[in-house]
Image (spheres, rainbow, N blue to C red):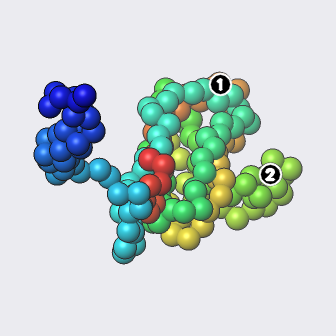
Amino acid sequence: MPTKTDVPAGPRFTISVLLVEIPFLILALAIHPQKPLFVEVTGEGELRSHTQSTGDVAFTLSAGAFHTFKFVVPSDHTDASLKGTFSVTGRRKSKVEAFVLNEGDYKSWLNGDTTFRVYDSGNVRQGSMDVSFPVDTGTYYVVFNNRSPVDAPTSVRAKMRLFYYSRWWPGMPQ
Protein backbone atom coordinates (compact mmCIF):
# COMPACT_ATOMS: atom_id res chain seq x y z
CA MET A 1 0.00 0.00 0.00
CA PRO A 2 1.51 3.34 -1.07
CA THR A 3 2.26 5.98 1.51
CA LYS A 4 2.57 9.77 1.13
CA THR A 5 6.34 9.51 0.88
CA ASP A 6 6.10 7.30 -2.22
CA VAL A 7 5.09 10.18 -4.58
CA PRO A 8 7.08 9.98 -7.86
CA ALA A 9 9.98 12.47 -8.15
CA GLY A 10 9.02 13.63 -11.70
CA PRO A 11 6.71 16.55 -10.82
CA ARG A 12 9.13 17.88 -8.19
CA PHE A 13 11.99 17.82 -10.72
CA THR A 14 9.91 19.62 -13.36
CA ILE A 15 8.86 22.29 -10.90
CA SER A 16 12.47 22.68 -9.77
CA VAL A 17 13.66 23.19 -13.37
CA LEU A 18 10.91 25.69 -14.12
CA LEU A 19 11.32 27.74 -10.95
CA VAL A 20 15.10 27.73 -10.46
CA GLU A 21 17.09 26.63 -13.50
CA ILE A 22 15.30 28.39 -16.36
CA PRO A 23 15.35 31.87 -14.73
CA PHE A 24 19.05 31.34 -13.96
CA LEU A 25 19.67 30.44 -17.63
CA ILE A 26 17.79 33.54 -18.82
CA LEU A 27 19.78 35.71 -16.43
CA ALA A 28 23.09 34.18 -17.62
CA LEU A 29 22.20 34.79 -21.27
CA ALA A 30 21.16 38.37 -20.53
CA ILE A 31 24.46 39.09 -18.77
CA HIS A 32 26.64 37.33 -21.40
CA PRO A 33 24.94 37.71 -24.78
CA GLN A 34 26.12 35.36 -27.49
CA LYS A 35 27.66 36.66 -30.72
CA PRO A 36 25.28 36.45 -33.68
CA LEU A 37 25.93 33.79 -36.28
CA PHE A 38 25.84 36.34 -39.09
CA VAL A 39 27.10 39.91 -39.06
CA GLU A 40 25.41 42.46 -41.27
CA VAL A 41 28.02 44.26 -43.36
CA THR A 42 27.03 47.70 -44.52
CA GLY A 43 28.92 50.52 -46.16
CA GLU A 44 32.33 50.31 -47.72
CA GLY A 45 34.17 48.57 -44.90
CA GLU A 46 37.02 49.94 -42.85
CA LEU A 47 39.99 51.53 -44.60
CA ARG A 48 43.23 50.12 -43.13
CA SER A 49 46.74 51.39 -43.78
CA HIS A 50 49.72 49.14 -44.52
CA THR A 51 53.45 49.84 -44.70
CA GLN A 52 56.27 47.70 -46.04
CA SER A 53 59.79 48.94 -45.45
CA THR A 54 63.31 48.01 -46.44
CA GLY A 55 64.54 49.59 -43.22
CA ASP A 56 67.68 51.66 -43.32
CA VAL A 57 70.02 49.63 -45.54
CA ALA A 58 73.56 50.10 -46.74
CA PHE A 59 75.16 48.33 -49.69
CA THR A 60 78.19 48.66 -51.94
CA LEU A 61 78.08 48.76 -55.73
CA SER A 62 81.09 47.94 -57.89
CA ALA A 63 81.48 49.89 -61.12
CA GLY A 64 78.76 48.77 -63.53
CA ALA A 65 76.87 46.82 -60.83
CA PHE A 66 73.30 47.29 -59.62
CA HIS A 67 71.20 46.43 -56.55
CA THR A 68 67.42 45.90 -56.52
CA PHE A 69 64.53 45.90 -54.07
CA LYS A 70 61.39 44.04 -55.11
CA PHE A 71 57.95 45.03 -53.84
CA VAL A 72 54.34 44.16 -54.67
CA VAL A 73 51.43 46.57 -54.94
CA PRO A 74 48.43 44.34 -54.02
CA SER A 75 45.34 44.18 -56.22
CA ASP A 76 42.99 45.34 -53.44
CA HIS A 77 44.99 48.49 -52.68
CA THR A 78 43.86 52.09 -52.57
CA ASP A 79 46.29 55.00 -53.01
CA ALA A 80 49.60 53.11 -52.96
CA SER A 81 52.82 55.11 -52.93
CA LEU A 82 56.52 54.37 -52.68
CA LYS A 83 58.53 56.89 -50.69
CA GLY A 84 62.20 56.82 -49.94
CA THR A 85 65.55 58.48 -49.71
CA PHE A 86 69.01 57.42 -50.76
CA SER A 87 72.52 58.84 -50.71
CA VAL A 88 76.00 57.93 -51.81
CA THR A 89 78.52 57.85 -48.97
CA GLY A 90 82.28 58.08 -49.28
CA ARG A 91 84.03 59.36 -52.41
CA ARG A 92 82.88 62.82 -53.53
CA LYS A 93 82.69 62.05 -57.23
CA SER A 94 80.66 58.85 -56.81
CA LYS A 95 77.08 58.94 -58.06
CA VAL A 96 74.31 56.42 -58.47
CA GLU A 97 71.18 56.18 -60.58
CA ALA A 98 67.91 55.07 -58.94
CA PHE A 99 64.80 54.09 -60.87
CA VAL A 100 61.54 52.15 -60.50
CA LEU A 101 60.36 49.60 -63.09
CA ASN A 102 57.37 47.29 -63.32
CA GLU A 103 58.10 43.59 -63.69
CA GLY A 104 57.92 43.49 -67.50
CA ASP A 105 60.15 46.53 -67.90
CA TYR A 106 62.61 45.13 -65.33
CA LYS A 107 63.03 41.95 -67.40
CA SER A 108 63.50 44.04 -70.53
CA TRP A 109 66.06 46.27 -68.78
CA LEU A 110 68.02 43.17 -67.71
CA ASN A 111 68.19 42.22 -71.41
CA GLY A 112 69.60 45.65 -72.27
CA ASP A 113 66.40 47.08 -73.77
CA THR A 114 65.15 50.66 -73.29
CA THR A 115 62.26 50.72 -70.82
CA PHE A 116 59.64 52.97 -69.29
CA ARG A 117 60.66 54.07 -65.81
CA VAL A 118 58.03 54.96 -63.26
CA TYR A 119 60.71 57.02 -61.50
CA ASP A 120 64.24 57.99 -62.59
CA SER A 121 66.61 60.04 -60.41
CA GLY A 122 69.29 60.52 -63.03
CA ASN A 123 72.93 60.10 -61.98
CA VAL A 124 73.06 61.78 -58.53
CA ARG A 125 74.76 61.66 -55.10
CA GLN A 126 71.45 61.72 -53.23
CA GLY A 127 67.75 61.75 -53.92
CA SER A 128 64.26 61.16 -52.69
CA MET A 129 61.32 59.51 -54.38
CA ASP A 130 57.57 59.77 -53.98
CA VAL A 131 55.94 57.55 -56.59
CA SER A 132 52.15 57.09 -56.70
CA PHE A 133 50.40 53.92 -57.86
CA PRO A 134 46.74 55.06 -57.84
CA VAL A 135 45.38 52.11 -59.83
CA ASP A 136 48.47 50.12 -60.82
CA THR A 137 49.05 46.74 -59.21
CA GLY A 138 51.76 44.14 -59.56
CA THR A 139 55.44 43.62 -58.90
CA TYR A 140 57.87 46.52 -59.09
CA TYR A 141 61.63 46.91 -58.66
CA VAL A 142 63.68 49.78 -57.26
CA VAL A 143 67.05 49.61 -59.01
CA PHE A 144 70.24 51.33 -57.85
CA ASN A 145 72.66 51.36 -60.75
CA ASN A 146 76.33 52.35 -60.58
CA ARG A 147 77.23 53.46 -64.11
CA SER A 148 80.51 54.95 -62.93
CA PRO A 149 83.54 53.93 -65.00
CA VAL A 150 85.75 54.34 -61.92
CA ASP A 151 86.80 50.99 -60.48
CA ALA A 152 86.34 52.09 -56.87
CA PRO A 153 83.12 50.74 -55.29
CA THR A 154 80.27 53.12 -54.42
CA SER A 155 78.57 52.87 -51.01
CA VAL A 156 74.85 53.65 -50.82
CA ARG A 157 72.42 54.13 -47.94
CA ALA A 158 68.73 53.83 -48.70
CA LYS A 159 65.37 53.58 -46.99
CA MET A 160 62.25 52.72 -49.01
CA ARG A 161 58.67 52.42 -47.77
CA LEU A 162 55.57 51.25 -49.64
CA PHE A 163 52.34 52.71 -48.23
CA TYR A 164 48.85 51.63 -49.24
CA TYR A 165 45.31 51.25 -47.96
CA SER A 166 42.94 48.32 -48.29
CA ARG A 167 39.32 47.71 -47.31
CA TRP A 168 38.50 45.38 -44.43
CA TRP A 169 35.11 44.03 -43.39
CA PRO A 170 34.17 42.06 -40.25
CA GLY A 171 34.90 38.39 -40.75
CA MET A 172 37.83 38.96 -43.11
CA PRO A 173 41.28 37.74 -42.03
CA GLN A 174 43.31 40.46 -40.35
Describe the element under mark 2 as helix, strand or loop: helix
Residue 163 location (% of width, % of height): 44, 53
Residue 60, quarter of picture:
top right
Residue at label 1? 152
Residue 87 in sight here: no
Residue situated in front as seen by the camera: 120 or 118 = 118
Q: Is residue 42 above or below residue 9?
A: below
Describe the element under mark 1 as helix, strand or loop: loop
Q: Residue at x 19, y 38 (%)?
A: 12
Label 1 Cα neighbours within 10 Å, binned few <14 / some 14-19 / many ≥20: few
Q: Nearer the viewer, mark 2 or mark 1?
A: 2
Q: Amino acid at mark 2?
A: Lys
Residue 135 location (% of width, % of height): 56, 71
Residue situated in front as seen by the camera: 24 or 137 = 24
Could you say which disc has been placed on residue 107 in the image? 2
Residue 53 in sight here: yes
Q: Residue at x 49, y 30 (%)?
A: 57
Residue 20 location (% of width, % of height): 14, 41
Q: CA distance from mark 2 to mark 1?
A: 28 Å
Instruction: Looking at this view, name the residue that lies furthest to the right.
Output: 111
Q: Amino acid at mark 1?
A: Ala
Label 2 Cα neighbours within 10 Å, binned few <14 / some 14-19 / many ≥20: few
Q: Earlier in the sequence, mark 2 or mark 1?
A: 2
Q: Residue at x 69, y 28 (%)?
A: 62
Q: Residue at x 51, y 27 (%)?
A: 58
Q: Is residue 60 above or below residue 13?
A: above
Residue situated in front as seen by the camera: 11 or 26 = 11
Specify whether 155 is left or right of 145. left
Residue 150 location (% of width, % of height): 68, 31
